[in-house]
Amino acid sequence: MTIVDDVRTIALSLPEATEKLAWGLPTFRVRNKIFASIGDDDMAIGVAVPRPERAHLLAAEPTKFYIRQGHDDDYDRMRVHLAAVDQDELRELLTDAWRLKAPKRLIALLE
């Protein structure tokens, strides 16, 4: 199993999460809102994250987290180098991203 398989397994284990191709890449959605996507090289994922938290993470761990200039600047998302995160952190990042996009009723199912 590859880390991309882990991303898919974790993302799709979340309530009402679905996978849909967009721009030729796998995206993971809840109620048709994208919370994560797999990059075109399978080396990184994009995840939804509030901008204040994003700024903190980018400053604290620039070798792990980054934004794609000109693409992520205006969105509440960042990129994650998959080789730099372990299974627990990957699960936490995906779950947090899902929570940002999921309705409160679904979020309650996790708690």
Image (spheres, rainbow, N blue to C red):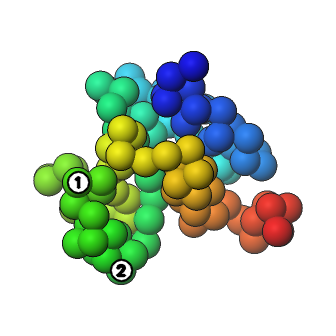
- The CA span between labels 1 and 2 is 18 Å
22 left or right of 30 in image = left
Per the rendering, the mark at residue 52 is 2
State the quadrant of the C terminus. bottom right
Residue 53, image x, y percentages: 39, 75
Query: In the picture shown, does residue 44 fall above or below 56?
Result: above
Q: CB atoms at circles 1 and 2 under 8 Å apart?
A: no
Determine whether 30 is above or below 1 in the image.
below
Q: Which residue is mark 1?
A: 63
Identify which residue is drawn at 52% across, 54% down: 89
Residue 23 falls in which quadrant of the image?
top left
Amino acid at the residue labelled 2: Pro
**Which picture quadrant has residue 81?**
top left
Which is more toward the observer, 59 or 53?
A: 59
User: Mark 1, residues whose alpha carbon is within 10 Å: few (<14), some, or many (≥20)?
Assistant: few
In the rendered structure, which amino acid carries the disc numbered 1? Thr
- Residue 4 locus on image (x, y percent): 49, 28
Question: Could you tell me which secondary element the residue under label 2 belongs to?
Answer: helix
Q: Is residue 38 left or right of residue 32?
A: left
Closer to viewer: mark 1 or mark 2: 1
- Residue 34 visible within the image: no
Q: From what the image shows, is residue 80 above or below residue 58? A: above
- Please name the residue shown 67% across and 61% down the image: 102
Residue 48 shows up from this direction: yes
Q: In percent of the image, x 75 and y 71: which residue is there?
A: 104
